[in-house]
Amino acid sequence: MPHISKQPSYRLHKARECAVVTIDGHNHYLGPYDSPESHEAYARLVSEWRSRPTTSQTLDSRTAEDAGGLSVSRLILAYWTFAQFYYQHDGQPTKELACMRDAIRPLRRLYGSTPVGQFGPKALKAVRQAMIDQGLCRTLVNNRINRVRRVFKWAVAEELIPASILHGLQAVTPLRYGRTTAPETEPVKPVPDAWVDATLPHVSRPVRAMIELQRLTGMRPQDVCHFRACDVDMTGSVWIYEPPQHKTRWRGHRRQIPLGPRAQQIVREFLTLDTSAYLFSPIEAEAERSRMRRAARRSKMTPSQARRRPKEHPQRPKGTHYDSDSYRRAIEYGIRQANRSGVEVPHWFPLQLRHTKGTDVRKRYGLEAAQVVLGHKHAAVTEVYAEKNLELAMRIAREIG
């Protein structure tokens, strides 16, 4: 974690009659006071100090040759201090931090007390095998192993371990399809409209609007969860929604989502005077559910029930907005309710709505149109989300096959 405390000052050391700066409790003498050489040395030392991790809960300065006795647990602890600062947004940890925790857990369990100098490619393969034994799929195992390597890459950049350790770990190739016992996962497929239509009557009004909005625009689940009126340009006939935070924001990409007339009508039903509030709120969904229960009530409310008030500090308070997990659980609830009512609805999840939109746009307007709608930088990514148009291949087969 880079230093955010007060910068060490450039001072005159009267006894030695030279410039001095104190960093982490150690004096560094810079040469004649106010000379160009002293200012250059001061700027260099401060820059190096700011780029280093904080001294609390991290490793002491050491040369690469001294890293042989450094344990893997201490290295993980040092990296975790950095990761908690790096993987955050608005003071809250991002999902990547949780992914890093899951990745390094088997590393610490198996090799926590092992010196870093003894952790090589075979040890990394053993960590990978432990992940396979957990039943993790091939792609997830590869992703977690890459995160483990990221820990050692960071340590090399901080000059905590020699680069030769990282080079050895990079020699471990990813698991290949059909050449491992790790299970394979099915690719995400578009969800049929019939499944979605059967689920809609059994979810709350905000969740129903989120599903419809995502189905019309192809936005990601996290984009619809964090939808706010202040992030929408409503000046034109087609509104433009630009999420302040999105999946590729860290790469410097902008995400602009056009909202047509049907999407605008959905949004209008939830607009309030507070444009900075999240449009779709679990609190509103719970209030609506309570109103429906009271309306369907047949017996008279007892006096004790009439006097009952909501808890001031509930153990599980409703959030101001949905996240990807709560949105998915709300849809799963609707699917269960639909199945209980006698309508058989297979399991589906929000990301499939994005695949459905991409496939439909590609079928009507081509791959480039699907790339624009889904907001992908490269068309190769769109290939994953938009199913190829089989009808075109079938027509060619009929004509020339």
Image: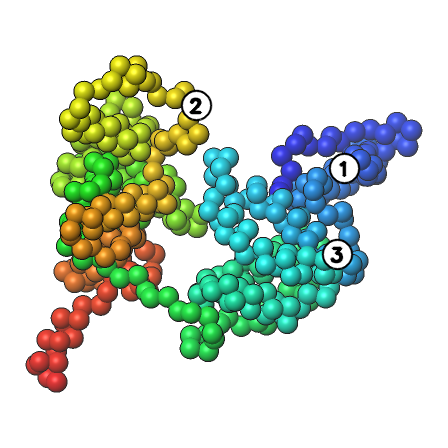
Q: Nearer the viewer, mark 3 or mark 2?
A: 2
- The residue carrying mark 2 is 313
| Quadrant of the rendered image containing residue 279 | top left
SS of the residue at dot 1? loop
The earlier-in-sequence mark between 3 and 2 is 3
Residue 12 visible in image: yes
Q: How far apart are marks 3 and 2 (CA)?
A: 46 Å
Image location of residue 233, percent across then percent down: 25, 35
Quarter of the figure with the C terminus: bottom left
The residue lying at 20 percent from left, 51 percent from top is 339
Between 388 and 330, the one lying in front of the other is 330
* Amino acid under disc 3: Leu
Which residue in the rendered view is the most extreme toward the right?
A: 15
User: Is residue 104 toward the left or the right of residue 9 in the image?
Assistant: left
Q: Which SS class for mark 2?
A: loop
User: Which of 348 and 55 lies nearest the eye of the viewer?
Assistant: 348
In this rendering, the answer to whether 167 lies above or below 239 is below
Work out whether residue 235 can be spotted: no
| Residue at x 82%, y 28% (from the top left corner) | 12
Q: Quadrant of the N terminus?
A: top right
- Real-space Cα distance between discs 1 and 2? 44 Å
CB under 8 Å between discs 1 and 2 = no
Residue type at mark 1?
Answer: Asp
Q: Name the residue under label 1.
A: 24
Q: Crowding near pointer 3: few (<14 within 10 Å), some, many (20+)?
A: some
